[in-house]
């Protein structure tokens, strides 16, 4: 356990609070595609079946919303971001990853945080398939950043050299959002 378990200005509660900017259209798993595009050598669309063939990783982590609440010790399972990077081969100039949700949500992540070993594309929470309201069937989990970076209902990752701001970032939230540096607003 790290020396300081709770980041500055945060306090723990028992359950996640669901935040959605919009309602989410239904989806059949056979129609699921994860679009990987932008400044990469190998842009591609992954089906649900393709995703299941990739390496898997379990990550136990606390989850911190920028509004001050956190939930300790959630167990996520999914595909590590490193496996995605290996597939697409980003160009050296890439500095940002824009994650897109099926609800129209977007969020920009600094490339070095996306590339961290604890960043995963999660399809399971606490041993169960990801619940609908927590991003079914796939969401990003980036424990090092506030939860608005952990895009639910993930359908695309866009790699770019230039900053394109996401939904909350356009509205004043921090482009990085590091929980230990308390980067809440810019
Ligand atoms: N697609 C999508 N992802 C999203 C959001 C959203 O509105 N749409 N809200 C974000 C915010 S602000 C938070 S705090 C977390 C909440 O995750 P939860 O709903 O699983 O508790 O999801 C993040 N990811
Ligand atoms: Mo949030």
Image (tube, rainbow, N blue to C red):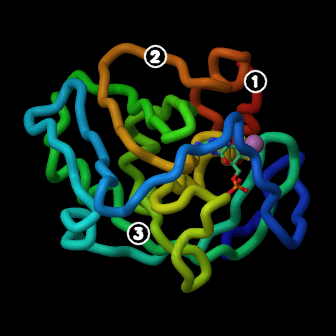
Report the front residue among 33 and 142: 33
CB under 8 Å between discs 1 and 2: no
The residue positioned 47% from the left and 62% from the top of the image is: 137
Q: Distance between the residues labelled 1 and 2?
A: 16 Å
Going by the image, does 94 lie left or right of 185? left
Residue ID for mark 1: 185
Label 2 element class: loop
Indicate left or right for 116 with 33 as reference.
right
How packed mark 3 is, by other alpha carbons closer than 10 Å (few <14, some 14-19, many 20 or more), is many
Task: Give the label on residue 161, or none.
Answer: none
Name the residue that disc number 2 marks: 164
As helix, strand or loop, the secondary structure at mark 1 comes to loop
Image quadrant containing the C terminus: top right
SS at mark 3 in the image: strand
Residue at 77% from the left image edge and 63% from the top image edge: 4
**Label 1 vs label 3, nearer the camera:** 3
Q: Nearer the viewer, residue 93 or 131?
A: 131
* Percent of width and height locating residue 99: 45, 36
Choose the circle earlier in sequence order: 1 or 2: 2
Residue 37: x %, y % from top left: 23, 32
Q: In this view, does 18 lie to the left or right of 123?
A: right
Residue on which disc 3 sits: 78
Callout 1 touching callout 3 (CB < 8 Å) = no
Who comes first in sequence, dot 3 or dot 2? 3
Q: Nearer the viewer, residue 137 or 158?
A: 137
Near mark 2 (Cα within 10 A), the count class, few <14, some 14-19 or many ≥20, is: some
Of badges 1 and 2, nearer the viewer stands 2
């Amino acid at each position: 356990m790290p020396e300081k378990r709770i980041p500055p200005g945060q306090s723990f509660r028992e359950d996640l609070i669901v935040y959605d900017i919009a309602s989410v259209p239904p989806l059949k798993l056979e129609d699921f595609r994860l679009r990987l595009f932008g400044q990469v050598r190998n842009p591609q669309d992954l089906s649900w079946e393709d995703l299941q063939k990739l390496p898997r990783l379990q990550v136990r982590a606390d989850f911190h919303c920028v509004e001050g609440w956190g939930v300790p010790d959630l167990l996520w399972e999914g595909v590590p971001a490193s496996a995605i990077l290996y597939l697409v081969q980003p160009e050296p100039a890439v500095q940002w990853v824009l994650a897109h949700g099926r609800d129209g949500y977007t969020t920009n992540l600094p490339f070095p945080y996306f590339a961290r070993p604890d960043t995963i594309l999660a399809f399971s929470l606490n041993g169960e398939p990801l619940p609908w309201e927590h991003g079914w069937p796939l969401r990003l989990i980036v424990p090092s950043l506030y939860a608005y970076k952990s895009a639910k209902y993930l359908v695309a990752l866009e790699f770019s050299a230039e900053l394109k701001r996401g939904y909350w970032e356009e509205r004043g939230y921090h482009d990085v959002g590091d929980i230990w540096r308390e980067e809440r607003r810019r």
